[in-house]
Image (cartoon, rainbow, N blue to C red):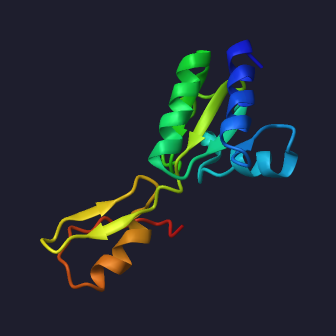
Amino acid sequence: MALGTAAAVDQFRTALPGKVVTPEVKPKYQGAVTRPWSQTCWTPAAGYVYLSNVQELTEALAIVKKTGSKFAIRKTGHNPNAGFSSADETAIVLDIRQFQSKELTSDGVARAGSGNTWARCMPGWKSRSCQLSEVETSRSD
């Protein structure tokens, strides 16, 4: 593990306890690596950090900047192109799948957090009789 990355992992463990998965935690680590739907996206990283809100993301980015470590931001893993991730065994993956807020305002504006999928959002929005251009997905996670 690169020096900056090792420092980042240590700082993440202190700042975000319980939210860091590294190769030493074998079952959780394997789950983190194989989370994306396409096997071509299964790139082992030095660590995965599971973030729940914007404040945690801001703190994580500050740690990445301070340590100079390589990183990638992952949401639902929909880029099946091999090699398109900036993460490898020397990088940190900041996972923002938990950003799952959903809102349909009284004036008809739909907002969805970046961790959502259409399959997760559309049923609730459809039930409120709103007219949205629908994008069908084959995945219903």
| Residue in the image at 21% along x and 67% along y | 133
Q: Relative to 116, say whether 81 is above or below.
A: above
- Count all numbered tags in the image, as a single digit: 0
Left or right of 13 on screen, residue 62 = left
- Which quarter of the rendering shows the C terminus? bottom right
Observer able to see residue 87: yes
Which residue is at 53% across, 43% downward? Answer: 56
Q: Quadrant of residue 5?
A: top right
Whole-percent x, y for residue 33 in the image: 70, 44
* Depicted 44 relative to depicted 63: above or below: below
- Residue 85 rendering spot, x and y as whole percentages: 54, 31
Image location (x, y in percent) of residue 98:
53, 57
Classify 140 as above or below 61. below
Q: Nearer the viewer, residue 138 or 49?
A: 49
Query: Which residue sits at x=74%, y=49%?
Result: 18
- Is residue 44 something one can see in this rendering? no
Residue 8 percent across, percent down from the top left: 67, 25
Q: Quadrant of the N terminus?
A: top right
User: Is 4 on the left or on the right of 113, as rendered?
Assistant: right
Name which residue lies at 87% across and 38% down. 24
Q: Is residue 68 above or below residue 73?
A: above
Residue 140 lies left or right of residue 26; in this view the side is: left
**Which residue, as the protein is rendered here, is positioned at the far left?**
107
